[in-house]
Image: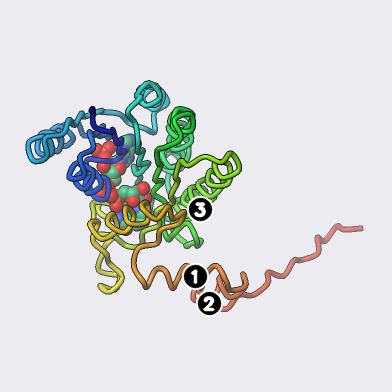
């Protein structure tokens, strides 16, 4: 019998590459998607020879509509697709009004547009077959608003809301298809190099390996968990953020007491 197929976006580095390695070891054939084809080819060859699976490199910039639609068409026509991992992502550093708008728009196209499109292409055949799974890689940042990276937080917040909504749709339809929002905290990968953010400012105790993150995600998938937050520290932070009043959350987010903004009366008001 042919192997099941898993598609991983952002498979050329970090968390996506670890997903590819773990899934190859489980016997999945792989569709590895990212922009750097040389990296994908190298990983595909390594996994084929190590695990006797078939791995294919699919070079695509998922922030570009034509590439996104090409990949979506490929996924919807693949009857063996059992698992889609929407993982590709990046961060943009800087205050919203100072950071380049085009970078932020690109992030929205990748974190929101591509996930929406690829999920829409993938779910109908999965629902029809009655099995399959989608993991959307969000972030602990999806539960907070953080000065200096608000577009990132907002897109990850969307990923959390979208995945929870999918869960409700599938449950209402009585479908056994599984969805997961994976919400890592700080994870060793190329992410911070790409974003131009130093790792030194972040306490060592908060860092996790991509292997730990992926292992907890896949363990959560077996238990059909909707939200997977790897690491006890992050579980605690997310639980706290979900239960405290907004005023306290803002204090946590800014490190300064929340003061209600005073609204000045316009001088010409009648
Ligand atoms: N690392 C963290 O601390 C952390 C924490 C929470 C959540 N996350 C999330 O985890 C996911 C994976 O990030 P990572 O930490 O593994 O970072 P990474 O090592 O930089 O990997 C990012 C992956 O996304 C791909 N990618 C970026 N832009 C793309 C585009 N336009 N089209 C297609 N692929 C694209 C990159 O491949 P190419 O450059 O070859 O295209 C790469 O394979 C992201 O969604 C990120 O937001 C990371």
Q: Which image quadrant is residue 204 in?
A: bottom left
Q: Is residue 1 above or below residue 49?
A: above
- Find disc 2 in the rendering and name its residue: 256
Q: Secondary structure at mark 1?
A: helix
Residue placed most toward the observer, 193 or 89: 89
- Find disc 3 in the rendering and name its residue: 157
CB under 8 Å between callouts 1 and 2? no
Q: Secondary structure at mark 3?
A: helix
Q: CA distance from mark 3 to mark 2?
A: 23 Å
Q: Which image quadrant is residue 263 in?
A: bottom right
Q: Is residue 240 above or below residue 175?
A: below
Report the disc number at residue 239. Answer: 1
Around disc 1, counting alpha carbons within 10 Å, would you say few (fewer than 14), some (14 to 19), or many (20 or more)?
A: few
Image quarter hosting the C terminus? bottom right
Nearest to the eye among marks 1 and 3: give it.
1
What residue is drawn where x is 23% and y is 61%? 209
Of the residues under marks 1 and 2, which one precedes in the sequence? 1
């Amino acid at each position: 019998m042919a192997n099941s197929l898993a598609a991983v976006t952002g498979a050329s580095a970090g968390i996506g590459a670890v997903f590819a390695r773990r899934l190859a070891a489980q016997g999945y054939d792989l569709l590895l998607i990212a922009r750097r084809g040389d990296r994908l080819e190298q990983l595909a060859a390594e996994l084929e020879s190590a695990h006797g699976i078939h791995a294919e490199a699919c070079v695509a910039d998922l922030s570009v509509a034509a590439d996104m639609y090409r990949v979506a068409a490929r996924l919807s026509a693949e009857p063996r697709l059992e698992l889609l991992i929407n993982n590709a992502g990046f961060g943009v550093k800087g205050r919203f009004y100072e950071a380049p708008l085009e970078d932020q728009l690109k992030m929205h196209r990748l974190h929101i547009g591509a996930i929406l499109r690829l999920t829409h292409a993938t779910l109908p055949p999965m629902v029809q077959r009655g099995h399959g799974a989608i993991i959307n890689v969000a972030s602990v940042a999806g539960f907070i608003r953080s000065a200096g990276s608000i577009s990132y937080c907002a897109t990850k917040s969307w990923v959390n809301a979208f995945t929870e909504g999918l869960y409700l749709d599938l449950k209402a339809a009585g479908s056994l298809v599984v969805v997961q929002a994976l919400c890592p905290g700080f994870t060793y990968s190329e992410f911070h190099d790409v974003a131009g953010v130093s790792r030194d400012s972040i306490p060592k105790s908060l860092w996790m390996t991509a292997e730990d993150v992926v292992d907890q995600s896949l363990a959560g998938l077996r238990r059909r968990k909707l939200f997977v937050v790897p690491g006890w520290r992050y579980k605690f932070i997310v639980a706290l953020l979900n239960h405290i009043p907004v005023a306290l959350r803002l204090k946590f987010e800014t490190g300064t007491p929340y003061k209600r903004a005073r609204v000045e009366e316009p001088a010409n008001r009648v």
